[in-house]
Image (cartoon, coloured by chain):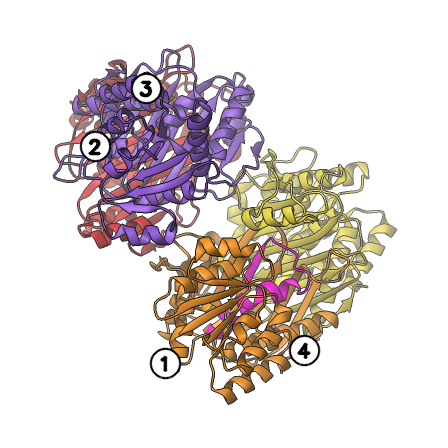
Chain colours: A orange, B yellow, C red, D purple
Amino acid sequence: MNIGIVGFGYWGTNIVRNFANLPGCTLKIVVDSRKERGEYLNNLCPTARFFIDSDEIIHNPEIDAVVIATPVFTHYELALKALTNDKHVLVEKPMATDSRQAQILIDLAEKKQKTLMVDHTYLYTSAVQRMKTLIINGDIGNIKYFDSTRINLGLFQPDINVLWDLAPHDISILNYLVPEKPYSVQATGISHTRNGIENIAYLTINYNSNLIAHINCSWSSPVKIRMMLVGGDKKMIVFNDLEPTEKIRVYDTWYDHKTDEDRKKILVDYRTGDIFIPKVENREALSVMAADFVSSVTNGSRPLSDYKVGLDVLKILEASQLSIKNKGKEVLIK
Amino acid sequence: MNIGIVGFGYWGTNIVRNFANLPGCTLKIVVDSRKERGEYLNNLCPTARFFIDSDEIIHNPEIDAVVIATPVFTHYELALKALTNDKHVLVEKPMATDSRQAQILIDLAEKKQKTLMVDHTYLYTSAVQRMKTLIINGDIGNIKYFDSTRINLGLFQPDINVLWDLAPHDISILNYLVPEKPYSVQATGISHTRNGIENIAYLTINYNSNLIAHINCSWSSPVKIRMMLVGGDKKMIVFNDLEPTEKIRVYDTWYDHKTDEDRKKILVDYRTGDIFIPKVENREALSVMAADFVSSVTNGSRPLSDYKVGLDVLKILEASQLSIKNKGKEVLIK
Amino acid sequence: MNIGIVGFGYWGTNIVRNFANLPGCTLKIVVDSRKERGEYLNNLCPTARFFIDSDEIIHNPEIDAVVIATPVFTHYELALKALTNDKHVLVEKPMATDSRQAQILIDLAEKKQKTLMVDHTYLYTSAVQRMKTLIINGDIGNIKYFDSTRINLGLFQPDINVLWDLAPHDISILNYLVPEKPYSVQATGISHTRNGIENIAYLTINYNSNLIAHINCSWSSPVKIRMMLVGGDKKMIVFNDLEPTEKIRVYDTWYDHKTDEDRKKILVDYRTGDIFIPKVENREALSVMAADFVSSVTNGSRPLSDYKVGLDVLKILEASQLSIKNKGKEVLIK
Amino acid sequence: MNIGIVGFGYWGTNIVRNFANLPGCTLKIVVDSRKERGEYLNNLCPTARFFIDSDEIIHNPEIDAVVIATPVFTHYELALKALTNDKHVLVEKPMATDSRQAQILIDLAEKKQKTLMVDHTYLYTSAVQRMKTLIINGDIGNIKYFDSTRINLGLFQPDINVLWDLAPHDISILNYLVPEKPYSVQATGISHTRNGIENIAYLTINYNSNLIAHINCSWSSPVKIRMMLVGGDKKMIVFNDLEPTEKIRVYDTWYDHKTDEDRKKILVDYRTGDIFIPKVENREALSVMAADFVSSVTNGSRPLSDYKVGLDVLKILEASQLSIKNKGKEVLIK
């Protein structure tokens, strides 16, 4: 299986490094419009060739699969061309700029019987896998809330707002952990630049049950926070992605306190049970994701982060954008 | 100046302790409907008398000022009676259950020329005072966002939701630090109990300028967080109230990054300047608040946390309640 | 049972507060040489009388037991007088300025059949009790090392060095957790004042087995650290006393790594197992200690923190002092 | 300038990566006794050749300089051969197994007029450079203590104890920051394996002035700590190397508290001044060290981490080893 990669920027470099070292596939070509990246590729993966035109990949019959790691607004066109030319496709998140485009890609992939996968890398982290296992095993109970803070001093993207940039991580994890489908969103935000693109935004996601999800994204925080609370009616999880070795904490805590005695204890103490910090393997999620793509192409297996995951994320992003424009009005998810 | 206190529960105990030790006033009477609190009062302040009926304070001509530390739904009636009987009044936050009631109290206080003060204790903390000084001195620049997280495993109040319970702290600080008046809110939330009272809620506050404020409140978090980000266009402040000695951090950071070089640095580093942690005095804010009340009654000075502060907080709470009921719809602040 | 307390300073205030509220005993008299403390006592415990002469307690036939919370150099004389006058005695740590004095007190207490107890409060904390339980249950295995850091910006005591001031906490916990008796010490330290009293000191304690204990004490650190590592050959405990709710962490970790595979994992990861943070009750250890004293006097039970504990601590302190004077030379514990 | 590297293990890999990308030199040959490392080198630096015999470097006239990244016990012999064959030498720390060997190397290097440099990488970190600047500028005042904790769950080295493995970092930083020469050490430690090699050790370093240094090293801690306190008589520094962006904290704190008022404040507060966290560049120290070596070879400049640094570290390690064997007895540094 021969692979071509379009886009060799910050994230693309990680993509290249992982596919270059992955068994079961050969990285043949890397494309980037910036000529000077060719030399850097030569250091990183001397066996791959470098071009500045993506057609060198898409029209190359030797290439089986294309990885698209370019700016968001180019995803749709590149993926469409690649699928049209009978390539399997792995595209960076978010998979397109709207769900209509995504649906066209999906339909084409199904028609062509090609893998169409979206790189929601987080799903492949040991931490998210561990949370999923805890939830499936019933340790957490029914999930009652999901609250994520993803803020730091980040690059102001010129084409997408902070939700489109950061929230795909949270939304893909949320959808993965929670079986229930959300039905609506409310979102608010602010732009501190003249282009009107929000650099701070808040998103609430609603469900038919009394589950609530909330995501706080910012490019403008002096401190970096990557913290996710997942509250079940048995236990609660705190996922702090900045902790090097203690990413997941399981709190033997729930707030169904009926007696006055319980109420009193909480006033004094603020914690009602033990905490468990499971050992989580320290592996690079990107390599697992890459292997899942190769396996899907080779064996026809359904990847964990398939186009359905990508589409569902997109629908929530679209709804949130509409809500921000309508001053926080509730918007139904398509 | 003789003082009577109505309400001798968790917070009332702190109130009693502070007024008992305060120069310039004498704590004469404490009232609580639970008879057994009388003995405890005897330990804490043996010179004060104990009753179970608030009329013992309100109709006692010896009493100059009444402190009301009872459940929220009783504030209005008690304050009204106290003012009617020519007492100065200090009432716990929030000052009433709606702004109409608050306005009646204010009008009466002005007519009677009595102090009417609301206990927004946080305004008297060294940390908030320090933030105010930094802002007034121009160190922070124009404030661009305010983001507060106030979550923990807390008592589910039976009569007020989590915003009414916790957000008065954030709103009073926000209003104190930011001179601009907010014009609208959006709020979302969820109740995990049958009484429909929200135990998790999110509030966005909007301004005519491109300033945004957001408050995240929860009684259902396994971890306790008290963190406030105040971002100016010169510097940013992080106020972590759980830090014993490092509550305020000033980041020499702003995100007006024009050059590609700057962009690159941020990708690598996530922080662009020095951090300064000013020494903040470790005093009990409640005693400063109590002294401000005594000074207002004695000298006629305007207290920092006056009825205007209380009313403004109430208006935002009211608007947020309406927004939650209307599924996050924008609601103008009266 | 009637109690008199000699010494009403910083710690004495806590002692008074606890005995004043303790069932089964009556606090009758408090003595402090500073007259002005009388008024403060009147606030704190109006039913107790105040004197400036300790004889008012020691020669008062109504008094059954004396608590001595004065500077260390006065402990011996006061305790001796109290025991001579048939009082039970609770003395602050360290119990005397040398072990010879301590032995005289012990002999007298045994002859008089009176309780002689030393206030090693830490033994009564929930955290230490929990560590003891873990060790007794065999969860930790054989203890292989004990490493404690107890540093902060503290008062330079005029009469005792930093080891005598701070290390009694660590030594009493060490002796409590580890059944094996230590046989020697080495200690080093430095004085930054003209009086030659060490404000920084390091103590190694040796055992016949290959267990080692080390204690790092300082009054001169800008950061406060209270961290104790207890390494067993099954698991390891980290006790961080500054954590409000997570004082005890149990690491499922040991370093008996035989295979190359294990070695590799450690290089990558630095942690080999799960972490467990047991819920530890948040109670005031001092009140449990006080109750243990009352119980001992009343029922003749042996207190947890008995004179044996006090004497053993003293012997290690004496040996460490001798070692510091002899430039770190190994000194046998008597 | 052509470079050969002997030793391509964990640290050797970092060395190779840095020299491969360094301007002003060419990495020609890498040697490692494990044949299979050849393939890995081909990935990392395809232009360098691989051999299993160090003579391929040492007897190669094309090679100007040799980097030795092999186990400690081989350093002397390899460096001797390299210098004898007129190569410049950069050797990993510690530079030899005793100071006599180091002196022979130094004498030979001087005679041959070749660079002999020891890789004390830490001296090249931005954090250490910043501390040095603060000290030189007089901000910290006279240094009064240095206290370093360097513990984690680490590989048990088969040939050197934990002090020889970890303390070179601390000693080289200490010697760099403190101009005064130490005159003696005391050290204690324990071995938990049958080979008698200490896996936990404590080292005190003494000076003629009342400065004290202490280093706590362990391969057996479940938590990783890299914390250094540097106390001056004006300010104090805390260097926490595990902090990603806040490695250096400067405390406006000293403990010369003369008045009772000061004493009181400290009891309440534990911190007496502001804290300043300077922005420290996030660069790879190893590349700066490598450039310093290249510059020394090319221009004859004296490297920061020269043989004098290496020799002084060795002398303290030797003295500490002797002290451990003599049960903590004070040992003079040669």
Task: Say which of marks 1 and 4 sits in front.
Answer: 1
**For this view, does D153 lie left or right of residue B187?**
left
- CA distance for labels 4 and 3: 79 Å
Closer to the chain start, of discs 1 and 4, is 1
Indicate the secondary structure of the residue bearing disc 3. Answer: helix
Of A160 and C127, nearer the camera is A160
Residue designated by label 3: D112
- Verify CB contact (< 8 Å) between mark 2 and mark 1: no
Give the image location of residue B256, x and y in percent.
70, 48
Task: Say which of marks 2 and 3 sits in front.
Answer: 3
Discs 4, 2: same chain: no
Q: In the rendered structure, which amino acid carries the disc numbered 3?
A: Lys
As displayed, is residue B159 above or below residue D278? below
Q: In the rendered structure, which amino acid carries the disc numbered 4?
A: Val
Q: In the rendered structure, which amino acid carries the disc numbered 2?
A: Phe
Residue designated by label 1: A299
- CA distance for labels 2 and 3: 23 Å
Give the image location of residue B7, x and y in percent.
62, 53
Q: Crowding at label 1, few (<14), some or many (≥20) Cα neighbours within 10 Å?
A: few
- Verify CB contact (< 8 Å) between mark 2 and mark 3: no
Indicate the secondary structure of the residue bearing disc 2. Answer: helix
On the image, which quarter does residue C83 sit in? top left
**Chain of the residue displaying label 1:** A
The magenta stretch spans which residues? A148-176
- Verify CB contact (< 8 Å) between mark 4 and mark 3: no
- CA distance for labels 4 and 2: 70 Å
Residue C16 in view here: no
Residue designated by label 4: A331
Closer to the chain start, of discs 2 and 3, is 2
